[in-house]
Image (tube, coloured by chain):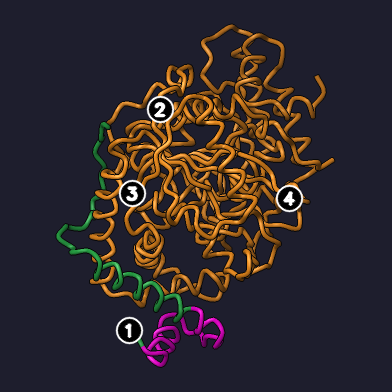
Amino acid sequence: MNSSKITSLTLSEISNLIRKGELSPIEVTSAYLERVDKLNSRLNAYITVLKDESLRAAEEAERMVKRKEKLGPLCGIPIAIKDILDMKGVPTTRGSKVFAKSVPNFDSTVVERLKNAGAVILGKLNMHEMAYGLTNENPHYGTVKNPWDVERISGGSSGGSAAAVAADLCTASLGTDTGGSIRIPASLCGVVGLKPTYGRVSRFGCGTLSWSLDHVSTMTKSVGDADLMLKVIAGYDPKDPTSVKYQVPNCEDALAEEVKGMRVGVPRSFFFDEVDGEVESAVNKALELVRELGASMKEVEIPHAKYGRSVAMVIMACEATSYYEGALLTHARDFGHDIMTRLMLGKLFHGVDYLKAQRLRTLFIKWLENSMRDIDVLVTPTTPIVATRIGENMVGMGERTVDVRDQLARFTSIWNLTGTPAFSIPCGFTSTGLPIGVQIVSRPFHEEIALRLAYAYESNTAWHKRKPSLQ
Amino acid sequence: MISREILKRIAEELCGVEMESAILERLISSYERLMSDLHELEKLETLNVEPSIQFKLRKVES
């Protein structure tokens, strides 16, 4: 098999071929390293490529396969991680000049779990500085380019994680999501982005942006791959005080189930207002297909949804500034302008404002519980717009001009506030060939329900199989 | 609400930098918009709840 065929395979496909002895972990890792070497200068997806380390890990995986030892679920699978997750002996830059020389002497829990599962860590991925932004225009490590159009943004903050998966520079990646930072780039780059329930995946060893909104998770080429990755990284971790002991759902069984009878809630008000025409049309077609597959539709209302992002932003601004105030005092000039401004914003709120936002958050959680009482999932567009041009701050939508940054997280950050699982999966392309994502939200600790719908939809479409032309 | 003068002073005191007026304007407008949304939401709903500081979710069945 030639190297571009290897890198185009999904995680599940590569894993099966390795287990059958038809592909070797060294062959797979070498194919990915070759592709990274060829394309990374164009996309800026990686900050650090771990060539020697990944080949060593691949050799070890190969030895295990040859000795017919019991293989971990990710044995020999090349995976890359956002450069905000600690990996022993490798710098964790957080996409910032300020942390460029920070080298941890331990693995984050998710990296430890990937290694224990046999994964080969290919490198660390570019991101919006400090994970505090949505465009991935990074003044220190370069802007991550969208593989579908290199003049456009990848979305952020986990832009490198999405671009690397979309461009076949890794089989799957890890990212973080505080207001949509996995789902937004997943939508803009045409890959699967999964934000699990808050507490489901450990944050230990992950650089903080806003501890009560931060989630760690995965981006993949398919829904089945997302399930495999979640099973490896999820589960209780005593090192993370917000980690929970709920059992990780067996999504494999759920994926085999039909969606007939599933109750889908569609929050038309707010989540379908002021949305790009092509995005709205693609999401409506996705809903139509889900209905044809046997799901029932019900229009629902998420009370005061339009205020969700503001409440989340007050919390994020206060927590981020309280966490990084020391760095702001000593390294103000080393931060990008946008980060410095956002850190400054947190200084303006009073303790009362922060607590008020946290109390409003409790109400949002209650409102969502009520809204989802008679339904299984909610479906919305992931973003109201598609990838914009690099450097473009405002974009036309119908007769209006709207702020790109305000638009990108409009439908995502509310689910960080409520902590509920929310996935983005590809659901179409614009006439100019840019990916569109649909968001599926389920109740807390019921990731398997959203995965079931996502899997059924994916199995009946081919959007996830399209590849950007980067040769 | 915080006045522009006080905000400018906070910026200078906090990190010893003089802020460009365009950035200052953006910062103030973000702050004002977020505060206005918070007040608006408060007018609509009584805050008879405690904050979720140690944020833990419970499993909810349909």
Q: Residues within 10 Å of mark 2 (few under 14, many from 20)?
A: many
Numbered disc 1: what chain? B
Residue at mark 2: A262
Toward which corner of the image does residue A427 lie, by quadrant?
Answer: top right
Look at discs 2 and 3 and give the one toward the viewer.
2
Q: Is residue A413 visible?
A: yes
Chain letter for the green colouring in the rendering:
B
Amino acid at dot 2:
Met
Question: Which residue is depicted at the point 37% across and 25% down?
Answer: A249
Foreground residue, A89 or A261? A261
Establish whether labels 2 and 4 are both on one chain.
yes
Q: Colour of chain A?
A: orange
Instruction: Determine the secondary structure under disc 2.
Output: loop
Establish whether labels 3 and 4 are both on one chain.
yes
Amino acid at dot 1:
Met
Q: Earlier in the sequence, mark 2 or mark 4?
A: 4
Residue at mark 3: A418
Look at discs 1 and 2 and give the one toward the viewer.
2
Q: Residues within 10 Å of mark 3 (few under 14, many from 20)?
A: many
C-alpha distance separating marks 1 and 2? 47 Å
Magenta run includes residue B4: yes
Question: Which residue is depicted at the point 24% across and 38% down?
Answer: B58
Q: Residues within 10 Å of mark 1 (few under 14, many from 20)?
A: few
Residue at mark 1: B1
Numbered disc 2: what chain? A
Please state the extent of the stretch shown in magenta in the rendering: B3-26
Toward which corner of the image does residue A395 lie, by quadrant?
Answer: bottom right
